[in-house]
């Protein structure tokens, strides 16, 4: 998860994540491998796909790799705000246009209903979503 959280790693080392997943598939489970105390708990409650979707260095290969190890992760809600990975992805402003479109197509293909999902409203929330 620390690797996915590191936005300074360019290009993203997909082969390293592939190695880690092959040797520890449980790392794809929600809440696995809690991080250091200095990091917020919400960063480690999210599924790795959420974390990857927030990383400006995300690649098509990375999304495909995570989905191949955890196909249902595209339907997992963020425990803090109810975002699906597609919502998290849409808030990621550091992507180039081609990567954005390719990744968005994958997320929609894997969970077409996600484009109709509304983000949970908290008390005092007007229901608008502002990425």
Image (spheres, rainbow, N blue to C red):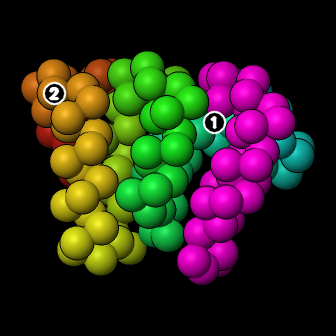
Q: In terms of depth relative to the viewer, which is nearer, 119 or 23?
A: 23
Depth check, mark 1 against mark 2: the one in front is 2
Q: Residues within 10 Å of mark 2 (few under 14, many from 20)?
A: few
From the top left corner, tell me how far across and down residue 123 is, in percent: 33, 22
Magenta stretch in the rendered image: 1-30
Q: In terms of depth relative to the viewer, which is nearer, 96 or 83?
A: 96
User: Can the viewer see residue 40?
Assistant: no
Q: Residue at x 49, y 33 (%)?
A: 68
Above or below, comparing residue 43 to residue 6 in the picture = above
- Secondary structure at numbered mark 1: helix
Please check the rendered image and state whether residue 87 is part of the magenta-colored stretch, yes or no: no
Give me the C-alpha separation between circle 1 and circle 2. Answer: 26 Å
Give the mark nearest the N terminus, 1 or 2: 1
- Look at mark 1 in the image and give the residue it sits on: 42
Q: In the picture, residue 31 is in which quadrant?
A: top right
Please check the rendered image and state whether residue 12 is part of the magenta-colored stretch, yes or no: yes
Q: Residue at x 24, y 26 (%)?
A: 111
Q: In terms of depth relative to the viewer, which is nearer, 46 or 75?
A: 75
- Secondary structure at numbered mark 2: helix
Residue at the right extreme, as displayed: 37
From the top left corner, tell me how far across and down residue 103 is, in percent: 30, 54
Q: In the picture, residue 84 is in which quadrant?
A: top left
User: Can the viewer see residue 110?
Assistant: yes
**Residue 70 shown left or right of residue 89 in the figure:** right
- Look at mark 2 in the image and give the residue it sits on: 112
**Residue 22 shown left or right of residue 55 in the figure:** right
From the top left corner, tell me how far across and down residue 15 is, in percent: 67, 60
């Amino acid at each position: 998860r620390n690797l996915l959280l590191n936005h300074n790693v360019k290009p993203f080392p997909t082969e390293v994540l592939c190695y880690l997943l092959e040797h520890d598939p449980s790392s794809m489970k929600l809440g696995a491998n809690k991080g250091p105390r200095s990091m917020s708990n919400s960063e480690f409650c999210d599924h790795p796909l959420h974390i990857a979707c927030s990383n400006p260095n995300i690649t098509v290969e990375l999304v495909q790799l995570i989905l191949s190890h955890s196909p249902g992760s595209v339907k997992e809600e963020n425990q803090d705000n109810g975002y699906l990975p597609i919502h998290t992805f849409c808030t990621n402003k550091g992507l180039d246009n081609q990567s954005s479109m390719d990744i968005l197509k994958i997320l929609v293909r894997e969970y077409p209903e996600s484009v109709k999902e509304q983000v949970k409203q908290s008390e005092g929330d007007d229901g608008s979503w502002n990425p």
